[in-house]
Every structure is written in C-alpha cells, then in structure tokens.
Image (cartoon, rainbow, N blue to C red):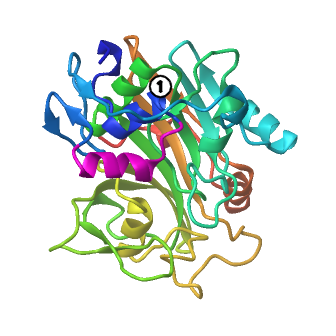
Amino acid sequence: MAADEADIRLDRWFKRHYPWLGHGKLEKLLRTGQVRVDGGRAKAATRLEAGQSIRIPPLGEAPKDDDKPRAPKADPQRIAELQAAVLHKDDAVIVLNKPPGLATQGGTGISEHLDGLLDYLRFGSTERPRLVHRLDKDTSGVLVLARTASAAAKLAAALRKREAHKLYWALTVGVPTPREGKIDMPLAKLPGILGERMTGDPEAGKSAITLYRVIATAGRRAAWLGMAPITGRTHQLRVHAAALGTPIAGDGKYGDSENQLTGSISRKLHLHARALRLEHPDGGILQAKAPLPPHMQASWDLLGLEIDAEADEWLE
C-alpha cells in the first residue's frame, strides 16, 4: 500500500481502487476472510498503515469505459450555486460554504446530495474531491473537501484526533441558563422508523461534549449562541441545545413544534458551521469562515443582531 494512503479505511481504499465493487460484495469478502491485511482478517473500518500488504481475491474484470458510472446529471443552477459557494481552493483542499437543504451524502429518500455532485468541483483536477467530514442536510456552513488521497488521510486524522477547532452559530428559542458553559451529555440513537434521531443516554450513549456561550439576545425571546463541539456525534448540537431548554429555531425534530419563533422568522433550521481551523495537509494552518445563509441573515437583521469580531471568538 502506498505511503500517501496511510490511515485510510479499508472500505474507502477499495472504493478508490475498485470503484465497481459494491459495498455488499466487499463485506462478504471480508466476512469470509477472502480479503486479508498483512495475512490477518480485517473489517471495513480497519485503518491501513503504510507498507501493509492487502490480499485481494480475483474480482473479475473492471467494467468497460462505456459501463463505468458517470457523474449524475444535475441542475445547472445547482452546479453554479455549488461552485459559487467555494470559499477557498488550493492544490490539496477545497473549502465550501454548504447551502442548507443539501444532504452531504445519500440515504433513504435522498435523490440529490453533495457526494453525488463532487465531480463538478474538480476544477481541472484528475482526482475527484473527497468528503472528510459531514454536516446535517439542513445545517449550512464550512465543509472541507480533500483534493488528493494523501490530503484526505491527513485531514481525516486531524478531525478524528480532535485537532480541529469548529465554531457554529445557532439561534435558539429562549435564552439558556447559564449563559456560558459545557454540555456533557452522552448520546445514543433511538430505535424506530421515524428517521435518524438521537437522545441523551448516560449509560449506553457515546461521549458528546459541547462548549457554548451566548453572544447576544433578542430580549428573552431568542439567543444567538456560539457552539463548539468537542466531539462529533450525529445531531449533537441540536440535542444539546434542546437539553438546555432552548431548542434551535426551526428544529422540528428536537424542538417543540409549539415553542418556535413566530412572525417573520424563517421556519428553516438556524444552525450554521461558521468557522473551522485545523492543520493544512501541506503544512501551516487552514482557517475558513462562512457567511450566514440568506434565511439566517434575514433573522439576524430582523432581530437586530450585529456581527462583530467578538462573535467570532473561539470557544476553547
């Protein structure tokens, strides 16, 4: 295995080198021991190390060029919107201001997602950009893409080791007490058929920690929160905000439908990945900041919330 692919998951390694091999087929090969890493059994989530040998059984011929999957057709307006949302681009990374309403990856009932549109963000590169982290469908803001395999491995390692600093902005229904603090509430997935949903569970849940502070308020009606997730659990900030008794405006999943901001405030989710700071794969520090999406900016204007340097202070 090449050195620039160190720390990549085994299933992602196969996706790069054998893109026609389906996930189900790979799982069967792993389960039956036909794929080995340094002679031993491995799982899809096994992280590879430089110099390791991967034993691969005969997989048949790769599909002909005419049979290879092509970039899905997309609305030209969506493509233009996505390309205009690029905040930073260099040889190793692309930083995107993901629009709200666009899912990061596919799933049940999702026909359009960022992962399926990445071919339109090549900008002349022979390699397709790679996702290294994700945002909820309705959350907007800073999202980093890797332009090379080595950049993806380094960025993923930095994110996994919690070396990245993330700042989110949220508008909450009501003002939390205390106005600054740390939420340490383990989260677990709720069983059921109502879609992905998380709940606080001190016994079976995984560690979930968020720092927060009130940046400004609109009386007792609403609060502008700065939130810094120390961990990265599904829906973490949304569940933690609700646990404070102040759900994020527009959050129909974790907020009380009768306890929302009324009037001209948008019913869309008011959660935005404002800024990210982490080590650049090629050295130095990568720092990015994303402006608010239109519906949140309109709410800020309506409530008289003014953005200044203090609002962007990191929660560390």
Q: Is residue 282 above or below residue 55?
A: above
Does the segment drawn in magenta span residue 24?
A: yes
Image point (31%, 55%), residue name: 210
Q: Bin the neighbour count of mark 1 within 10 Å (Cα to Cα): few under 14, some 14-19, many 20 and up.
A: some
Single out the residue that lies furthest toward the right.
Answer: 76
Main SS, magenta region, reads: helix
Classify the position of the C terminus by image quarter: top left
Give whichever of 63, 274 is nearer the camera. Answer: 63
Q: Is 249 placed left or right of 295 in the picture? A: left
Image point (32%, 30%), residue name: 8
Helix, strand or loop at label 1? It is strand
Q: Position of residue 287 (x, y in %)?
A: 47, 25
Q: How many marks?
A: 1
Q: Position of residue 307 (x, y in %)?
A: 60, 43
Figure quadrant of residue 46: top left
Give the residue number, with chain letter if any, for mark 1.
287
Give whichever of 103, 85 is nearer the camera. Answer: 103
Q: Position of residue 99 (x, y in %)?
A: 67, 47
Does the segment drawn in magenta span residue 135?
A: no
Question: Could you tell me the amino acid type at mark 1?
Answer: Gln
Q: Is residue 214 above or below residue 78?
A: below
Q: Is 177 placed left or right of 299 in the picture? A: left
Classify the position of the N terminus by image quarter: top left
Image point (77%, 71%), residue name: 264
Q: Position of residue 14 (x, y in %)?
A: 40, 34
Figure quadrant of residue 89: top right
Q: Which residues are magenta?
A: 20-33
Q: Does residue 280 appear anywhere in the picture?
A: no
Q: Is residue 279 above or below residue 9?
A: above
Figure quadrant of residue 286: top left
Q: Does residue 134 appear anywhere in the picture?
A: yes
